[in-house]
Image (tube, grey):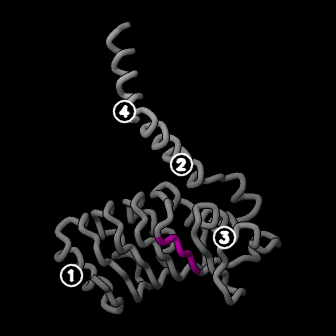
Amino acid sequence: MNFATVTNRKLWDKGIIQRLGKRSFYMWLNFVFNRVDEGRIEEFGPERVAAEWVLRCGGGVKFKHLEKWMWDYNAIPDGPVGKLALEGINAKGVNITTGGLQHLVGLQHLKQLNMNSCRYVTDMKKLLPVKETLEHLDIGNCGGISDLTPLHELTKLTKLHLVNTPGIKQREEAIATLQKKLPECVIEK
């Protein structure tokens, strides 16, 4: 037997290869669930496709014309493109990714976005498509976020949750600068 075969057998016996295989599978699954399907957006509109994305990943959504939050993918109402107005996304603890935030493009009514404990979200620039409507943002417990500068453009923001975000570079200075740029925003740090 050659060295590679012996090494692989030892790693297999220790369970390392099986764990790597599972991890790779789940990373692939996260990628698939967060992938943006442009054709689907053209056919069904960005509001519905964004809702499908969040629900498929295990989160919840709130539509403007409905009183309750929706957590069931199969309960999304049917209708023509433009009928749905997505105003809230609750992705707390869900495996959405920075790439998946591309689903925010084209959303006209999003006021509330909860990404608390979303460990795969790192780039706040991806929130800029909703800068004209977003009022409440929770990015607490998102350890991968390091730069708050893009949030300066979220001029409608009235509430921002930043608790337990140790990855932010020069955290206290960054929060102070953000507070100056957004004086109407209550920042929970």
Query: Which quadrant holds residue 6?
Result: top left
User: If you read the primary sequence from the N terminus, does the residue marked by circle 3 or circle 1 appear first?
Assistant: 3
Q: Report how many numbered discs are placed on residues in the image.
A: 4
Could you tell me which residue is drawn at 52 percent across and 70 percent down? Answer: 91
Q: Amino acid at mark 2?
A: Phe
Number of other residues with Cα within 10 Å of mark 2, as a class: few under 14, some 14 to 19, many 20 or more: some
Distance of label 3 from label 4 (alpha carbons): 47 Å
Number of other residues with Cα within 10 Å of mark 3, as a class: few under 14, some 14 to 19, many 20 or more: many
Number of other residues with Cα within 10 Å of mark 1, as a class: few under 14, some 14 to 19, many 20 or more: few
Q: Amino acid at mark 3?
A: Glu
Q: Which residues are magenta?
A: 88-92
Distance of label 4 from label 1 (alpha carbons): 49 Å
Give residue 96's mark: none
Instruction: Please say whether residue 151 is one of the residues in the magenta stretch.
Output: no
Q: Secondary structure at mark 2?
A: helix
Q: Taking 70 as reference, is 19 above or below it? A: above
Name the front one of labels 4 and 1.
Answer: 4
Name the front one of labels 2 and 4.
Answer: 4
Dots 3, 4 in contact, CB < 8 A? no
